Amino acid sequence: MNYHFQAHRQVRKNLLSILQNTSHEDLLLIPDGFNNNIYWNIAHTVATQQLLHYYLSGNPFRIDKYWIETYKKGTLPNLNVQKSEVEDLEFLLTETSKILMKDYDSDFFSDYTPYTTSFGMDLKSIQDAIIFNNMHESLHYGYIMAQKRAILGEKGR
């Protein structure tokens, strides 16, 4: 699983770099042809990771439920995000990855409720969930890259 944790840390570093190096305005802008923004996509990865790993294993979330309720699948982007919330998300991107590894190493995920994702993948264990989550976060990273290109195009840069 070390490789999968390494991959998770790398995806999170990439997301963190975007969060830190994109203007607040651009983080919240919904480009033409999209139904959400860069900020929502990043926050959504944190919320989904908690659901896939903690909720489905019957464990408490490691983050405030606000993040789950606001950024889970099916939610709409918040266009009034304060800079302090962006800073909180920066912290969560790194810390939830570290906590996941510690929890995994301490056998925190002994039970797991099987779940079929909307992508069509059957998750039967925490290992399946960790591997799928990396794919999910990478998918949103790609989506974010497309949004960044669309924003650049809209601004005529």
Image (cartoon, grey):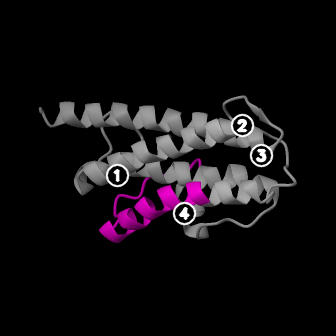
Against 53, is 60 above or below?
below
The type of residue carrying mark 3 is Ile
| Mark 3, secondary structure of its residue | helix
Identify the disc placed on residue 19: 1
When asked about the image quadrant of residue 60, the answer is: bottom right
Q: Give the CA distance from mark 2 to mark 4.
A: 20 Å
Mark 2: which amino acid?
Thr
Q: Is residue 37 visible?
A: no
| Residue name at image x 70 percent, y 49 percent | 52
Residue at numbered disc 4: 67
Counting residues from the start of the chain, the first of labels 2 and 4 encountered is 4
User: Nearer the N terminus, badge 1 or badge 4?
Assistant: 1
Indicate the position of residue 155 as horizontal and vertical percent values: 15, 37
- In the image, which is nearer the foreground, mark 4 or mark 3? 3
| Label drawn at residue 102 | none
Spatial separation of the CA atoms under disc 1 and disc 2? 27 Å
Magenta part of the chain = 73-98
Residue found farthest to the left = 156
Q: Above or below — where is 51 with respect to 133?
A: below
